[in-house]
Image: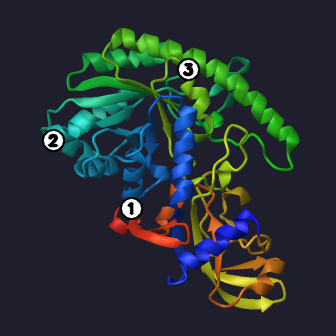
Protein backbone atom coordinates (compact mmCIF):
# COMPACT_ATOMS: atom_id res chain seq x y z
CA UNK A 1 0.00 0.00 0.00
CA UNK A 2 1.37 3.41 -0.97
CA UNK A 3 1.55 6.23 1.57
CA UNK A 4 -1.31 7.98 -0.21
CA UNK A 5 -3.43 4.86 -0.20
CA UNK A 6 -2.76 4.49 3.53
CA UNK A 7 -3.87 8.09 4.08
CA UNK A 8 -7.06 7.42 2.15
CA UNK A 9 -7.80 4.38 4.29
CA UNK A 10 -7.21 6.42 7.47
CA UNK A 11 -9.36 9.31 6.31
CA UNK A 12 -12.18 7.01 5.23
CA UNK A 13 -12.13 5.22 8.60
CA UNK A 14 -11.96 8.48 10.55
CA UNK A 15 -14.94 9.95 8.71
CA UNK A 16 -17.01 6.80 8.19
CA UNK A 17 -19.70 8.30 10.45
CA UNK A 18 -19.77 11.59 8.52
CA UNK A 19 -21.59 12.27 5.28
CA UNK A 20 -19.68 14.16 2.61
CA UNK A 21 -19.05 16.94 1.67
CA UNK A 22 -16.66 17.09 4.60
CA UNK A 23 -13.33 18.82 5.26
CA UNK A 24 -10.52 17.57 7.48
CA UNK A 25 -7.11 18.63 8.73
CA UNK A 26 -4.61 15.88 9.46
CA UNK A 27 -3.04 17.13 12.70
CA UNK A 28 0.07 14.97 12.40
CA UNK A 29 0.80 16.54 9.01
CA UNK A 30 -0.18 20.02 10.25
CA UNK A 31 2.21 19.79 13.21
CA UNK A 32 5.03 18.35 11.10
CA UNK A 33 4.64 21.22 8.62
CA UNK A 34 4.71 23.76 11.45
CA UNK A 35 7.87 22.20 12.88
CA UNK A 36 9.55 22.30 9.47
CA UNK A 37 8.69 25.99 9.06
CA UNK A 38 10.24 26.73 12.46
CA UNK A 39 13.37 24.80 11.46
CA UNK A 40 13.67 26.77 8.23
CA UNK A 41 13.14 30.08 10.04
CA UNK A 42 16.36 29.49 11.98
CA UNK A 43 15.26 31.11 15.22
CA UNK A 44 13.31 34.04 13.79
CA UNK A 45 9.64 34.13 14.81
CA UNK A 46 6.96 33.27 12.27
CA UNK A 47 3.88 35.47 12.09
CA UNK A 48 0.97 33.29 10.95
CA UNK A 49 -0.96 34.45 7.90
CA UNK A 50 -4.55 33.98 9.01
CA UNK A 51 -5.94 33.99 5.46
CA UNK A 52 -4.13 30.70 4.95
CA UNK A 53 -5.75 29.10 8.02
CA UNK A 54 -9.18 30.74 8.62
CA UNK A 55 -9.87 28.69 11.73
CA UNK A 56 -9.28 30.07 15.21
CA UNK A 57 -8.70 26.67 16.79
CA UNK A 58 -5.84 25.97 14.39
CA UNK A 59 -4.44 29.49 14.70
CA UNK A 60 -4.32 28.95 18.45
CA UNK A 61 -2.73 25.52 18.02
CA UNK A 62 0.13 26.83 15.92
CA UNK A 63 0.65 29.96 18.03
CA UNK A 64 1.09 27.73 21.08
CA UNK A 65 4.20 26.27 19.43
CA UNK A 66 7.65 27.72 20.03
CA UNK A 67 8.76 29.68 16.99
CA UNK A 68 5.41 31.27 16.13
CA UNK A 69 4.36 34.72 17.33
CA UNK A 70 1.62 37.03 16.13
CA UNK A 71 -0.99 36.97 13.39
CA UNK A 72 -0.94 38.54 9.94
CA UNK A 73 -4.61 39.27 9.22
CA UNK A 74 -6.33 40.14 5.95
CA UNK A 75 -9.13 42.61 6.80
CA UNK A 76 -9.60 45.22 9.48
CA UNK A 77 -12.86 43.62 10.65
CA UNK A 78 -11.01 40.34 11.13
CA UNK A 79 -8.19 42.12 12.95
CA UNK A 80 -10.60 43.70 15.43
CA UNK A 81 -12.45 40.40 15.93
CA UNK A 82 -9.21 38.57 16.67
CA UNK A 83 -8.05 41.34 19.01
CA UNK A 84 -11.34 41.23 20.91
CA UNK A 85 -10.93 37.44 21.11
CA UNK A 86 -7.65 37.79 22.96
CA UNK A 87 -5.00 37.82 20.23
CA UNK A 88 -2.33 40.23 21.38
CA UNK A 89 -0.34 40.98 18.21
CA UNK A 90 -2.29 41.42 14.97
CA UNK A 91 -0.72 42.90 11.85
CA UNK A 92 -3.22 43.83 9.14
CA UNK A 93 -1.31 42.90 5.99
CA UNK A 94 -3.36 44.99 3.54
CA UNK A 95 -4.59 48.59 3.49
CA UNK A 96 -8.22 49.05 4.50
CA UNK A 97 -11.08 51.36 3.56
CA UNK A 98 -13.27 50.26 6.50
CA UNK A 99 -14.51 53.52 8.06
CA UNK A 100 -16.48 51.85 10.83
CA UNK A 101 -13.50 49.65 11.65
CA UNK A 102 -11.14 52.61 11.96
CA UNK A 103 -13.64 54.46 14.15
CA UNK A 104 -13.72 51.42 16.44
CA UNK A 105 -9.94 51.00 16.43
CA UNK A 106 -9.19 54.63 17.26
CA UNK A 107 -11.76 54.73 20.06
CA UNK A 108 -10.55 51.67 21.98
CA UNK A 109 -7.13 51.74 23.69
CA UNK A 110 -6.99 47.95 23.96
CA UNK A 111 -7.57 47.45 20.25
CA UNK A 112 -5.19 50.24 19.28
CA UNK A 113 -2.46 48.64 21.39
CA UNK A 114 -2.54 45.26 19.63
CA UNK A 115 -3.59 45.98 16.02
CA UNK A 116 -1.13 47.39 13.48
CA UNK A 117 -2.50 48.65 10.15
CA UNK A 118 -0.88 48.74 6.72
CA UNK A 119 -0.13 52.04 4.98
CA UNK A 120 1.64 52.76 1.70
CA UNK A 121 0.11 56.10 0.71
CA UNK A 122 -0.48 59.44 2.50
CA UNK A 123 -4.12 59.06 1.45
CA UNK A 124 -4.41 56.14 3.86
CA UNK A 125 -3.53 58.43 6.76
CA UNK A 126 -6.11 61.00 5.67
CA UNK A 127 -8.74 58.28 5.32
CA UNK A 128 -8.10 57.00 8.84
CA UNK A 129 -8.26 60.50 10.31
CA UNK A 130 -11.55 61.18 8.53
CA UNK A 131 -12.95 57.90 9.89
CA UNK A 132 -11.92 58.49 13.52
CA UNK A 133 -15.31 59.87 14.57
CA UNK A 134 -13.78 61.35 17.69
CA UNK A 135 -11.37 58.48 18.34
CA UNK A 136 -8.01 59.75 19.55
CA UNK A 137 -5.96 56.59 20.03
CA UNK A 138 -2.58 56.45 18.33
CA UNK A 139 -2.68 54.14 15.31
CA UNK A 140 0.19 51.68 14.93
CA UNK A 141 1.39 51.80 11.34
CA UNK A 142 3.33 49.34 9.18
CA UNK A 143 4.78 50.55 5.88
CA UNK A 144 4.73 48.14 2.95
CA UNK A 145 7.64 47.93 0.52
CA UNK A 146 7.07 46.92 -3.09
CA UNK A 147 9.32 43.89 -3.50
CA UNK A 148 8.97 43.45 -7.26
CA UNK A 149 12.08 42.94 -9.34
CA UNK A 150 12.50 45.65 -11.97
CA UNK A 151 14.76 45.06 -14.94
CA UNK A 152 15.80 47.01 -18.03
CA UNK A 153 15.27 50.37 -16.37
CA UNK A 154 11.86 49.40 -15.05
CA UNK A 155 10.47 48.25 -18.41
CA UNK A 156 10.23 44.69 -17.08
CA UNK A 157 8.55 44.01 -13.74
CA UNK A 158 8.40 40.66 -11.95
CA UNK A 159 6.18 40.48 -8.88
CA UNK A 160 2.77 41.46 -7.57
CA UNK A 161 1.43 44.99 -7.98
CA UNK A 162 1.09 45.97 -4.35
CA UNK A 163 2.70 49.00 -2.74
CA UNK A 164 3.84 52.09 -4.70
CA UNK A 165 6.84 52.35 -2.35
CA UNK A 166 9.83 50.78 -4.10
CA UNK A 167 12.99 52.58 -3.05
CA UNK A 168 14.44 53.26 0.41
CA UNK A 169 13.75 56.95 -0.19
CA UNK A 170 10.08 56.24 -0.98
CA UNK A 171 9.55 54.39 2.29
CA UNK A 172 11.58 56.86 4.37
CA UNK A 173 9.60 59.79 2.95
CA UNK A 174 6.33 58.21 4.02
CA UNK A 175 7.81 57.37 7.42
CA UNK A 176 8.60 61.05 7.88
CA UNK A 177 5.03 62.01 6.96
CA UNK A 178 3.70 59.56 9.53
CA UNK A 179 6.12 60.83 12.17
CA UNK A 180 4.94 64.41 11.62
CA UNK A 181 1.24 63.53 11.71
CA UNK A 182 -0.36 63.38 15.18
CA UNK A 183 -2.13 60.15 16.04
CA UNK A 184 0.14 57.76 14.15
CA UNK A 185 3.32 55.82 14.90
CA UNK A 186 5.52 53.78 12.54
CA UNK A 187 6.22 50.43 14.20
CA UNK A 188 6.97 48.10 11.31
CA UNK A 189 7.93 47.41 7.71
CA UNK A 190 6.46 44.61 5.61
CA UNK A 191 7.95 43.29 2.37
CA UNK A 192 6.21 40.20 1.00
CA UNK A 193 8.12 38.66 -1.91
CA UNK A 194 5.32 36.72 -3.59
CA UNK A 195 7.31 36.15 -6.78
CA UNK A 196 9.86 34.25 -4.69
CA UNK A 197 7.75 32.73 -1.92
CA UNK A 198 4.61 31.95 -3.91
CA UNK A 199 5.84 30.67 -7.28
CA UNK A 200 6.87 27.05 -7.67
CA UNK A 201 10.30 26.49 -9.23
CA UNK A 202 10.01 22.80 -10.11
CA UNK A 203 6.94 22.48 -12.33
CA UNK A 204 6.47 18.91 -13.51
CA UNK A 205 7.03 18.52 -17.25
CA UNK A 206 8.32 22.06 -17.71
CA UNK A 207 12.08 21.98 -17.11
CA UNK A 208 12.88 25.15 -19.05
CA UNK A 209 10.23 27.18 -17.25
CA UNK A 210 11.39 25.78 -13.91
CA UNK A 211 14.99 26.76 -14.63
CA UNK A 212 13.89 30.25 -15.68
CA UNK A 213 11.91 30.64 -12.44
CA UNK A 214 14.92 29.55 -10.36
CA UNK A 215 17.18 32.05 -12.12
CA UNK A 216 14.62 34.83 -11.67
CA UNK A 217 14.18 34.01 -7.99
CA UNK A 218 17.91 33.91 -7.31
CA UNK A 219 18.30 37.34 -8.93
CA UNK A 220 15.27 38.70 -7.07
CA UNK A 221 16.52 37.41 -3.70
CA UNK A 222 19.87 39.15 -4.09
CA UNK A 223 18.33 42.43 -5.20
CA UNK A 224 15.65 42.43 -2.51
CA UNK A 225 18.00 41.53 0.34
CA UNK A 226 20.15 44.56 -0.44
CA UNK A 227 17.17 46.88 -0.92
CA UNK A 228 15.30 45.63 2.14
CA UNK A 229 18.34 46.26 4.34
CA UNK A 230 18.64 49.79 2.95
CA UNK A 231 14.94 50.41 3.60
CA UNK A 232 15.25 49.23 7.19
CA UNK A 233 18.22 51.55 7.78
CA UNK A 234 16.41 54.51 6.21
CA UNK A 235 13.23 54.00 8.24
CA UNK A 236 15.09 53.43 11.52
CA UNK A 237 16.75 56.81 11.00
CA UNK A 238 13.26 58.34 11.05
CA UNK A 239 11.57 55.92 13.48
CA UNK A 240 14.23 54.54 15.85
CA UNK A 241 11.55 52.66 17.78
CA UNK A 242 10.79 50.42 14.78
CA UNK A 243 9.63 47.09 16.22
CA UNK A 244 9.77 44.68 13.28
CA UNK A 245 10.73 44.10 9.66
CA UNK A 246 8.52 41.38 8.19
CA UNK A 247 9.29 39.38 5.08
CA UNK A 248 8.95 35.98 3.59
CA UNK A 249 6.23 33.56 2.66
CA UNK A 250 6.06 29.78 2.85
CA UNK A 251 8.28 29.19 -0.16
CA UNK A 252 11.13 31.45 0.96
CA UNK A 253 11.24 31.06 4.75
CA UNK A 254 14.88 30.02 5.04
CA UNK A 255 16.13 32.52 2.46
CA UNK A 256 14.34 35.48 4.02
CA UNK A 257 15.31 34.45 7.54
CA UNK A 258 18.96 34.62 6.50
CA UNK A 259 18.70 38.39 5.96
CA UNK A 260 20.00 40.35 8.95
CA UNK A 261 17.49 43.14 8.33
CA UNK A 262 14.47 40.84 8.67
CA UNK A 263 13.25 40.31 12.23
CA UNK A 264 10.23 38.06 11.56
CA UNK A 265 8.78 35.82 8.85
CA UNK A 266 5.23 35.90 7.56
CA UNK A 267 3.87 32.51 6.42
CA UNK A 268 0.80 30.31 6.65
CA UNK A 269 0.11 28.20 3.56
CA UNK A 270 2.86 25.78 4.55
CA UNK A 271 0.69 24.56 7.41
CA UNK A 272 -1.97 23.10 5.10
CA UNK A 273 0.28 22.58 2.00
CA UNK A 274 -2.28 23.02 -0.79
CA UNK A 275 -1.60 21.81 -4.32
CA UNK A 276 0.11 25.02 -5.50
CA UNK A 277 2.92 24.25 -3.05
CA UNK A 278 3.85 20.93 -4.62
CA UNK A 279 6.33 22.43 -7.08
CA UNK A 280 9.11 23.79 -4.85
CA UNK A 281 12.73 22.82 -4.40
CA UNK A 282 13.07 24.94 -1.25
CA UNK A 283 10.85 22.74 0.93
CA UNK A 284 8.62 19.70 0.91
CA UNK A 285 5.54 19.56 3.14
CA UNK A 286 2.80 17.05 3.88
CA UNK A 287 -0.72 17.77 2.60
CA UNK A 288 -2.71 18.43 5.76
CA UNK A 289 -6.02 19.96 4.62
CA UNK A 290 -8.31 17.96 2.35
CA UNK A 291 -12.01 17.75 1.59
CA UNK A 292 -14.17 14.88 0.43
CA UNK A 293 -17.10 14.89 -1.98
CA UNK A 294 -19.53 11.97 -2.25
CA UNK A 295 -20.02 9.80 -5.31
CA UNK A 296 -23.62 10.33 -6.45
CA UNK A 297 -23.58 8.86 -9.99
CA UNK A 298 -21.84 6.15 -12.02
CA UNK A 299 -22.46 7.25 -15.63
CA UNK A 300 -20.40 4.49 -17.21
CA UNK A 301 -17.18 2.52 -17.19
CA UNK A 302 -14.30 4.55 -15.78
CA UNK A 303 -16.53 7.46 -14.72
CA UNK A 304 -18.08 8.62 -11.46
CA UNK A 305 -19.82 11.86 -10.61
CA UNK A 306 -19.34 13.58 -7.26
CA UNK A 307 -21.54 16.24 -5.69
CA UNK A 308 -20.12 19.78 -5.94
CA UNK A 309 -16.47 20.48 -6.64
CA UNK A 310 -16.39 23.88 -8.34
CA UNK A 311 -14.15 25.51 -5.74
CA UNK A 312 -11.62 27.50 -7.79
CA UNK A 313 -8.88 29.45 -6.05
CA UNK A 314 -8.15 33.13 -6.51
CA UNK A 315 -5.54 34.35 -8.98
CA UNK A 316 -5.22 34.20 -12.74
CA UNK A 317 -7.80 31.72 -14.01
CA UNK A 318 -6.38 28.37 -15.09
CA UNK A 319 -6.44 24.65 -14.48
CA UNK A 320 -3.90 25.07 -11.68
CA UNK A 321 -6.52 27.04 -9.71
CA UNK A 322 -8.87 24.07 -9.45
CA UNK A 323 -8.87 21.56 -6.61
CA UNK A 324 -7.08 18.37 -7.60
CA UNK A 325 -8.64 14.91 -7.15
CA UNK A 326 -6.25 13.36 -4.64
CA UNK A 327 -7.57 10.07 -3.25
CA UNK A 328 -8.01 7.52 -4.64
CA UNK A 329 -5.03 8.11 -6.90
CA UNK A 330 -5.59 8.19 -10.63
CA UNK A 331 -8.79 10.22 -11.00
CA UNK A 332 -8.91 13.26 -13.26
CA UNK A 333 -11.38 15.83 -14.54
CA UNK A 334 -13.30 15.48 -17.76
CA UNK A 335 -11.67 18.27 -19.83
CA UNK A 336 -15.06 19.18 -21.33
CA UNK A 337 -16.64 19.78 -17.90
CA UNK A 338 -13.94 20.46 -15.33
CA UNK A 339 -15.06 21.13 -11.75
CA UNK A 340 -18.81 21.76 -11.67
CA UNK A 341 -21.01 24.01 -9.60
CA UNK A 342 -23.24 21.15 -8.38
CA UNK A 343 -21.65 18.02 -9.81
CA UNK A 344 -18.27 16.98 -11.16
CA UNK A 345 -17.55 13.94 -13.33
CA UNK A 346 -14.23 12.22 -12.71
CA UNK A 347 -12.48 9.87 -15.10
CA UNK A 348 -10.03 7.04 -14.51
CA UNK A 349 -9.89 3.35 -13.71
CA UNK A 350 -10.27 3.90 -9.92
CA UNK A 351 -13.82 5.08 -10.66
CA UNK A 352 -14.90 1.48 -11.26
CA UNK A 353 -14.14 0.60 -7.63
CA UNK A 354 -16.19 3.46 -6.19
CA UNK A 355 -19.77 3.01 -5.00
CA UNK A 356 -22.57 5.51 -4.45
CA UNK A 357 -21.78 7.35 -1.22
CA UNK A 358 -18.03 6.68 -1.29
CA UNK A 359 -15.76 9.65 -0.68
CA UNK A 360 -13.34 11.17 -3.18
CA UNK A 361 -10.73 13.33 -1.47
CA UNK A 362 -9.51 16.59 -3.00
CA UNK A 363 -6.79 19.12 -2.27
CA UNK A 364 -7.61 22.79 -2.80
CA UNK A 365 -5.27 24.87 -4.92
CA UNK A 366 -4.73 27.39 -2.12
CA UNK A 367 -4.75 27.06 1.64
CA UNK A 368 -7.37 28.96 3.61
CA UNK A 369 -9.81 29.43 0.75
CA UNK A 370 -11.06 25.89 1.29
CA UNK A 371 -12.50 27.09 4.60
CA UNK A 372 -14.87 29.46 2.79
CA UNK A 373 -16.70 26.34 1.57
CA UNK A 374 -17.03 24.53 4.90
CA UNK A 375 -18.48 25.48 8.28
CA UNK A 376 -16.38 22.97 10.20
CA UNK A 377 -13.05 21.20 10.04
CA UNK A 378 -12.76 17.70 11.46
CA UNK A 379 -9.34 17.27 13.05
CA UNK A 380 -7.91 13.83 12.39
CA UNK A 381 -5.15 12.02 14.25
CA UNK A 382 -4.35 8.54 13.06
CA UNK A 383 -7.69 7.11 11.98
CA UNK A 384 -9.90 9.07 14.40
CA UNK A 385 -11.58 12.46 14.43
CA UNK A 386 -10.36 13.96 17.70
CA UNK A 387 -12.20 17.28 17.46
CA UNK A 388 -14.56 19.23 15.23
CA UNK A 389 -13.95 22.96 15.10
CA UNK A 390 -15.59 25.87 13.26
CA UNK A 391 -13.96 27.70 10.42
CA UNK A 392 -14.33 31.48 10.16
CA UNK A 393 -17.42 30.78 8.04
CA UNK A 394 -18.73 28.45 10.74
CA UNK A 395 -18.48 31.30 13.23
CA UNK A 396 -20.47 33.53 10.88
CA UNK A 397 -17.36 35.48 9.85
CA UNK A 398 -17.02 35.80 6.09
CA UNK A 399 -14.68 38.76 5.84
CA UNK A 400 -14.12 38.60 2.09
Task: Give the mark nearer the N terminus: 1 vs 3.
Answer: 3
Considering the image in quadrants, where does the N terminus appear? bottom right
Q: Which mark is residue 259?
A: 3
Q: How is the image coloured?
A: rainbow
Left or right: 222 in relation to 93:
right
Q: Secondary structure at mark 2?
A: loop
Can residue 329 be seen? Answer: yes
Q: CA distance from mark 2 to mark 1?
A: 24 Å
Mark 3 Cα shell of 10 Å, populated few (<14), some (14-19), many (≥20): some
Q: Secondary structure at mark 1?
A: loop
Front residue (pair 274, 191): 274
Task: Give the mark nearer the N terminus: 2 vs 1.
Answer: 2
Eye-nearest disc, 2 or 1: 1
Disc 2 marks which residue?
A: 108
Q: CA distance from mark 1 to mark 3?
A: 34 Å
Q: Position of residue 187 (x, y in %)?
A: 33, 24
Can residue 95 be seen? Answer: no
Which residue sits at x=59%, y=55%? Answer: 366
Disc 1 marks which residue?
A: 392
Eye-nearest disc, 1 or 3: 3
Cβ–Cβ under 8 Å for marks 2 and 3: no
Which residue sits at x=29%, y=45%? Answer: 87
Front residue (pair 281, 364): 281
Front residue (pair 56, 175): 56
Question: Image height check: is 69 above or below 156?
Answer: below
Considering the image in quadrants, where does the C terminus appear? bottom left
Amino acid sequence: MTARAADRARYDRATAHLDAPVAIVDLDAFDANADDMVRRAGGKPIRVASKSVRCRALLERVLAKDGFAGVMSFTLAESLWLARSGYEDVLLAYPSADRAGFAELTSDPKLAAVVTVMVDDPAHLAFIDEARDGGREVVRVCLELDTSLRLLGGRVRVGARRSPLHSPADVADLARLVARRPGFEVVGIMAYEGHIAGVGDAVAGRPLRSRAVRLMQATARRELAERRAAVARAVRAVAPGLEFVNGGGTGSVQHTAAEDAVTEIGAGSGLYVPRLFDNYTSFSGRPAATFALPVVRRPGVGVVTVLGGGYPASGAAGVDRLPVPYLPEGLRYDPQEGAGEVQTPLLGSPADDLLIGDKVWFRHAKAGEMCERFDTLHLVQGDRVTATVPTYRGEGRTFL
